[in-house]
Amino acid sequence: MKRRLGTYLFFALCCFWAYTQEEQESAEVFLEEYTDEFQENFFEALKQKGIQNYDRAAILLLECKRIDPENSVIDYELAKVYALDKKYIQAQEFAIDALNAKPTDFWYLENLMGILGKQGTTVETIQQRIPFGNKKLQENLAVVYFKKKKYRRALKVLESLGESEFTEDLTRKINDSLEQGKEKRAVVESKKQPEKKDDPIAAYKQQIEELLEKSDYKKMESVSKTALDSYPLQPYFYYTYGTALNGVSKSAKAIEVLESALDYVLDDPALINKIYRELSKAYSAIGNTQKANDYLNKIKTGS
């Protein structure tokens, strides 16, 4: 159990997404500087949040912040705890701090957007307090709007980004969502479009499948993350990234990634079942048997 907690904390200190091998090694050394008090408070806070004891969770996280004031993960967790407790002003401040520390982190932005939405306001009201012009932040913002089905706002963001594979892909998905008979239209378009000899998505999938067969989860984690960074609308890459995270005992992060995958899957029962199985495995790993069983019960036979 202690080893699993240490593994998750190491991953959290890497701030979830963009890190290199060198950064992983330096973070491992940095982790040694953390006291038992910090680790105990951090994981007890997560436990208290899970049982909806938000006041206690906030107190423990604030103690972590006293020990390490610059840790954006603590700001992110505090924002989530205060939001769950409906203390949106405090939640917003910590969410802004977290995003300023890591402007390209999708989950930091999504968390802030959710908090703003609970208050009936928009990101424009606080855009002077965050690096709003950051291109990756803008791409993430478009994806957040897409997930929330705010298609017009997503298109407006995309217009400011110029032409790219990302904007073309997301624009196409938005237009499909705005029309009736989206599935039929997608089938027709796929038949009309000639197959490309060089298909980077297919190349990533093949590479990942080979790594999965060999259970090389460490390399699979890196390849899947790169694929997801390049193609953030592909649910398959969310699934493989989450599976890899499970494979290297980063179960808490796996849950976040895999649950995001469900936002993108439209009609693929086989993939959905795979995601449910990995979510069940991840929740079992962190000791939440109820959620693990819930996802097992969601799996449909015959798919």
Image: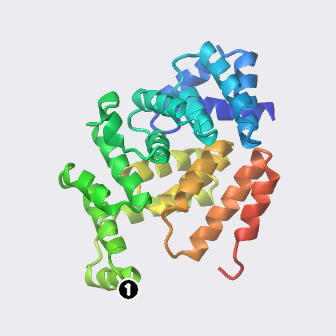
Res. 165 image quadrant: bottom left
Q: Which residue is mark 1?
A: 184
Q: How is the image coloured?
A: rainbow
Q: How many numbered discs?
A: 1
The image position of residue 232, as x and y in percent, is 41, 54
In depth, the one of 66 and 282 nearer the eye is: 66
Question: Where does residue 253 sit, x and y in percent of width and height?
Answer: 61, 44
Residue 281 falls left or right of residue 31: right
Above or below, 117 relative to 267: above
Q: Quadrant of residue 63?
A: top right
- Along the line of sight, the residue nearer the viewer: 215 or 244: 244
Residue at the image position 64 percent from the left and 38 percent from the top: 85
Q: What amino acid type should be assigned to the residue bearing mark 1?
A: Lys
Q: Nearer the viewer, residue 253 or 41?
A: 41
- Say if residue 216 shows up in the picture: no
Furthest-front residue in view? 120
| Residue 70 % position (x, y) | 51, 18
Q: Can you see residue 227?
A: yes
Q: Residue at x 39, y 44 (%)?
A: 121
| Label 1, residues with CA under 10 Å away: few <14, some 14-19, many ≥20 | few
When the figure is inspected, residue 64 is found, relative to residue 221, above or below; the finding is: above
In which quadrant of the rendered image does the C terminus lie? bottom right
Q: Quadrant of the N terminus?
A: top right
Q: Position of residue 102 (x, y in %)?
A: 42, 31
Instruction: Give me the residue at 36% from left, 82% from top.
Output: 180
Q: Residue at x 51, y 29 (%)?
A: 94
Q: Quadrant of residue 59?
A: top right
SS at badge 1: helix
Q: Is residue 207 left or right of residue 57?
A: left
